[in-house]
Image: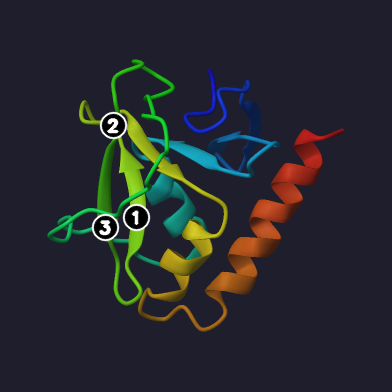
Amino acid sequence: MQCPVCREPLVVVERDRIELDWCPWCRGLWFDEGELSLLAETLGLTIDLGAPKAGSASRPGARPRSCPRCDRGLEEVRVGGEPSVALDRCPRGHGHWFEAGELATLVQQQPGASSAPDAALRFMGETLREGQR
């Protein structure tokens, strides 16, 4: 699979039933459908993307992004609280693309997330270090 942003190959790392597709160049993460729920369960949270917020984020001059699974154009949606997070999602439901920092922002907004960002960073850091061996 290729990164939707820089079109470089994604690196696959797996931990605790969660297979992450990670871009070591731009530090983005692709979550296949259902994998975000597995991460939330691991962290003891409910990560609710909810309904997309009205309006979309703007990336002037950015080239279109494609789903790593089906190569169809990704839809940009705003989710979460304030500040909202602009995620890219596959219109066919294959998954979500998180740019660097977006997952941490979304996790911090979840109820009961006082220590969850640290736990998420530890989990993600250990997973990515394992993938580099």
Residue 24 left/right relative to 93 = right
Earlier in the chain: of badge 3 and badge 1, it is 3
Please name the residue that numbered disc 1 is placed on.
Answer: 86
Q: Quadrant of residue 71?
A: top left
Callout in the foreground (3, 2): 3
State the image coordinates of residue 7 (x, y, percent, origin top left): 55, 23
Outermost residue, right direction?
A: 133
* 3D distance between C-alphas at marks 1 and 2: 13 Å
Please name the residue that numbered disc 2 is placed on.
Answer: 90
Outermost residue, front direction?
A: 61
State the image coordinates of residue 121 (x, y, percent, origin top left): 65, 63
Secondary structure beneath dot 3 equals: strand
Render colour scheme = rainbow
Residue type at the position of mark 3: Arg
Please tell me how crowded label 3 is: few (under 14), some (14-19), or many (20+) other residues with Cα within 10 Å. Answer: many
State the image coordinates of residue 128 (x, y, percent, origin top left): 72, 44
Residue at coordinates 26% horizontally, 57% vertically from top-left? 78
Secondary structure beneath dot 1 equals: strand
* 3D distance between C-alphas at marks 3 and 1: 4 Å
Please name the residue that numbered disc 3 is placed on.
Answer: 78
**Along the line of sight, which residue is nearer the eye, 11 or 72?**
72
Q: Are marks 3 and 1 in contact (CB under 8 Å)?
A: yes
Residue at coordinates 41% horizontally, 65% vertically from top-left? 106
**Along the line of sight, which residue is nearer the eye, 92 or 17?**
92
**Along the line of sight, which residue is nearer the eye, 26 or 18?**
26
* 3D distance between C-alphas at marks 3 and 2: 14 Å
Please tell me how crowded label 2 is: few (under 14), some (14-19), or many (20+) other residues with Cα within 10 Å. Answer: many
Residue type at the position of mark 1: Ala
Q: With respect to residue 75, does 1 lie above or below?
A: above
Earlier in the chain: of badge 3 and badge 2, it is 3
State the image coordinates of residue 22 (x, y, percent, origin top left): 61, 36
Q: Are marks 1 and 2 in contact (CB under 8 Å)?
A: no
